[in-house]
Image (cartoon, grey):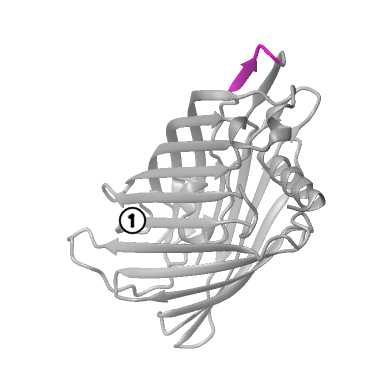
């Protein structure tokens, strides 16, 4: 392999896996292009607000063509327990080079009716984070670097909260902090600490009725991480005859994406997204990122429902 390409790949992967400063190193949360279909992953207040028992599955392959690039799988299950209470489970498996991260969260929401069609939901989540870093899976240069030390099977708790204000079918806005704990890992070799930083999420979206067959929904997801640049995803999706969804998304200083989805049956929706990296980080080494998802909905009566509103959220 060309030495220059080999070096660029290694640098790119390490930059994304860890953010270095004088006192901390942190592995940050995985990102999704189709976040609007699994809002529970960033805001526990969303749990059960769709009014149906839902199962969501996603696979993301980032930077196809680069060895050790991020591979992420996510599974979400949610349901209303009553008119006011919702429950959910979110599981994520994230692999990046020598690092493997697994997380599982239980979500709880309580909804207060604020108007005929508006509601305010308060959410709490609690779960675990598992992190394993094995540099023997990396390059020879990594294995000989005294500054890179394995993190063996670190298990830590996570507690988060969120607020989700939403209309029945038209709009939503939410603010959340998925993990208020900043667990530190100590390395006696480096005499240094690794710390997971606080992630604040702001989400918003609005559904416009263009005509009887066409609906349009712009949406925003903004992520604020201590010590990192502001991250923002701006998307625009069109829904045609409650069946076909087409849209585009822009992630600030990172990627431009195309999105497509189709309501296969009344209860089954499939989606796909392709990211074209604009940051230059992969330097032409990757053909882009791919993301596929499935969402299955059941009514509380356990009969498959007919989706009668553009529930992009």
Residue name at image x 65 percent, y 16 percent: 187
Regarding residue 164, the answer to whether it shows in the image is yes
Residue at x-position 30% and y-position 75%: 265
- State the residue lying farthest toward the front: 1
- Number of marks: 1
Q: What span is colored magenta in the figure?
A: 183-189
Q: Position of residue 165 (x, y in %)?
A: 50, 53
**Residue 78: percent from left, percent from top:** 34, 50
Lateral position of residue 185 relative to residue 75, left or right: right
Q: Is residue 62 left or right of residue 296?
A: right
**Residue 145 located within the stretch drawn in magenta:** no
Residue 49 sits in quarter: bottom left
Against 309, residue 313 (above or below) is: above
Task: Give the answer, above or below, for where 79 lies relative to 64.
Answer: above
Q: Which residue is mark 1?
A: 55
Is 188 a magenta residue?
A: yes
Residue 300 in picture, x, y percent from top left: 22, 58
Q: Label 1: how many residues lie within 10 Å, few (<14), some (14-19) or many (20+)?
A: many
Q: What secondary structure is found at the residue carrying circle 1? A: strand
Above or below 187: residue 89: below
Q: Position of residue 160 (x, y in %)?
A: 50, 34
The residue positioned farthest toward the bottom in the image shown:
212
Between 8 and 179, which is closer to the camera in this rendering?
8
Asked if one can make out residue 121 in the rendered structure from this viewpoint, the answer is: no
Query: Residue 140 appears in which quarter of the rendering?
Result: top right
């Amino acid at each position: 392999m060309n030495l220059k390409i080999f070096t660029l790949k290694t640098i790119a992967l390490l930059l994304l896996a860890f953010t270095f400063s004088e006192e901390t190193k942190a592995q940050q949360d995985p990102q999704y292009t189709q976040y609007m279909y699994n809002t529970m992953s960033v805001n526990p207040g969303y749990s059960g607000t769709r009014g149906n028992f839902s199962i969501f599955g996603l696979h993301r392959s980032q930077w196809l063509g680069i060895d050790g690039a991020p591979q992420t799988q996510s599974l979400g299950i949610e349901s209303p327990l009553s008119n006011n209470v919702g429950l959910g489970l979110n599981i994520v498996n994230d692999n990046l080079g020598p690092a493997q991260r697994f997380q599982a969260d239980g979500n709880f929401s309580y909804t207060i009716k604020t108007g005929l069609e508006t509601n305010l939901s308060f959410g709490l989540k609690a779960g675990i984070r598992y992190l394993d870093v094995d540099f023997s899976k990396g390059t020879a240069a990594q294995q000989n670097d005294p500054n890179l030390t394995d993190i063996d099977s670190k298990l830590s708790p996570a507690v988060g909260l969120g607020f989700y204000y939403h209309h029945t079918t038209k709009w939503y806005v939410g603010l959340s902090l998925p993990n208020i704990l900043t667990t530190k890992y100590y390395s006696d070799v480096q005499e240094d600490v690794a710390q997971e930083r606080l992630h604040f999420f702001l989400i918003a979206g609005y559904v416009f009725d263009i005509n009887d067959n066409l609906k349009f929904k712009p949406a925003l997801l903004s992520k604020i991480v201590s010590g990192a640049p502001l991250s923002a995803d701006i998307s625009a999706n069109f829904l045609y005859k409650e069946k076909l969804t087409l849209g585009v998304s822009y992630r600030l200083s990172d990627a431009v994406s195309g999105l497509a989805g189709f309501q296969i049956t009344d209860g089954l929706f499939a989606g796909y997204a392709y990211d074209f990296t604009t940051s230059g980080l992969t330097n032409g080494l990757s053909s882009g990122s791919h993301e596929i998802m499935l969402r299955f909905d059941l009514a509380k009566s356990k009969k498959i429902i007919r989706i009668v509103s553009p529930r992009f959220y």
